Amino acid sequence: MEELIRVSREEWKQWLDSRAPSSFGQHPDFERNFKECRARAYTHFEEGQFDKTIFGEEISLSNLADSRHPEVFVIPRDRYLFVVDEWDDAIGFERVIFPFSSTDFYVDTEREGIFQELLKSDAFFRLGKIEQLGYLVPPRPEEWDKEIKVSYTAPQFHHTRWCHSLLTAILMELVLARNGFSKIERAPMVLAAGCHDIATPAGGDSVKRVDPEALGEVKNFAWVLKHHGLAERWSNQFGFDLSLATDWVKSKGAIGKLLNALDKISYVALDCYYLGLQREGQIRDLCIRHPLIMDLWQDIRFTPHRTSFGFSEPERLFQFLLLKAYEYQEFLFNPYSRALDLFLKKMTQPLYEKGVITKKQLLTQGNDWLLQVLSEHYPQQIKWYIEPEELSWRKFSTPEKQQEFCSQMGDRIDHLERITGFPTGLDWPVFHQQRKRVVSLRQAISQKKIELLEEIVASVQGYYVYFRS
């Protein structure tokens, strides 16, 4: 007979506390409810009883069902919930987390429909093998001693294009359903949203730079769907029009513009959450000040004839666009964070040009395959850790100044880069004067806020030189 291991109340409490979720990214009311559940469970433990609420308040998916979108269940984030399916089993990792919002989600993959079709396809599954942020690393805090050399495991961020694309598809389904689009109408739109990144090459954006024209996601969107037989299959099942879907992925028309907005909402939420868990900074501070900033998906309303849409809360849209701008300034376009962003590109380029690695392989394989191939050809150069301090950088205002500096550095130059900025989002649509008309955000916010967004864009523009220290 196995011996029963007994622990004290204090040991039990310490074990549970060590597994408490971080408050960052949570609903403002979650932590209070979580502490209440834990305190009640600790008291019952002391009395010799076991309280199931230690895992959260149990709630069945059936209580969260909504007939408008039967494949997607919306889970409140303001409470510590233990969500179970029809067999009373916890849904666990199948819960789709949406940080900085009032809602998480669950997709019923047992039900025949668009999400079952999407998730069972090999083309969509491959996105789970491509990290969203590649070889980017957290920004180096200014207060760190510059003599300290820092290494990171590669990749540093593990959320994938799969996570991002699924969340984008879920948001498309919910927004359309809640704006009166029928199941038949929205099916092709949701599939396009879920597949908008389906032609991302193995290695992500870094490898796409090997041949930007040939390896772009939009350019290869139709090819991937045809290659896997999805265009024809979904045409028969859901009325999916590949030509129209390609236009949506290019941000054309009202649905294309909606897809563009939901795409950005999805990746900003995930990127800023995982970065904010690691580093303090403007991104983390803004998310803490506006813990429900991602609820702006619930602000989207279509006009009566559904020819256009707008956001009903201009201030929340501005705060979101400010967060997106900070992500570019502090992280995505931060020279320290992206010093080795071209690492995979430099290794892949020669093999691609020789035909050792082909376009078809890059569009049908994942990062695991790519790293295996690169390891075979560059056994001494492929690293499982990253040292951004290997490279220094300088920023210049003109290409002439960039070239002048390069001529002085000789063979120490690693690579050059020009950053032209990023869209401010000031042209995004909002409802003005009690939803009587749709105008651009630029027309609905103060000049001071407009200038702030434009200043952030200007701060990243320039001609960069990366060189060996």
Image: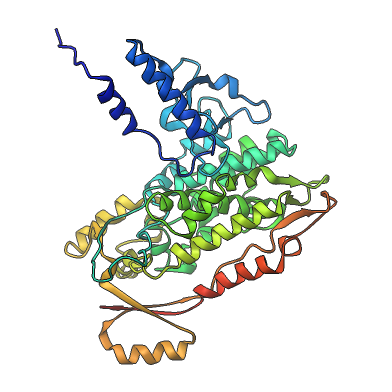
Measured from the top left, where is residue 360 in percent x and y?
40, 56
Q: Residue at x 51, y 76 (%)?
A: 461
Nearer to the camera, 305 or 350: 305
Q: Residue at x 73, y 38 (%)?
A: 181
Q: Is residue 311 above or below residue 95?
A: below
Q: Residue at x 49, y 66 (%)?
A: 329
In terms of image quadrants, where is residue 8? top left
Nearer to the camera, 81 or 337: 81
Measured from the top left, where is residue 399 in percent x and y?
46, 87
Circle count: 0
Measured from the top left, where is residue 354 in percent x and y?
30, 69
Query: Which quadrant of the figure contains the N terminus?
Result: top left
Res 142 seen here = yes
Instruction: Identify the coloring.
Output: rainbow
Q: Residue at x 57, y 19 (%)?
A: 62
Query: Residue furthest toward the right?
Result: 436
Nearer to the camera, 214 or 368: 368
Query: Residue furthest toward the top?
Result: 1
Res 231 seen here = no
Measured from the top left, where is residue 438 in percent x and y?
79, 55
Nearer to the camera, 132 or 56: 56
Drawn side of residue 406 relative to residue 161, left or right: left
Query: Which quadrant of the figure contains the C terminus?
Result: bottom left
Q: Is residue 413 above or below residue 264?
A: below
In terms of image quadrants, where is residue 201? bottom left
Q: Is residue 297 above or below residue 447?
A: above
Drawn side of residue 447 relative to residue 53, left or right: right
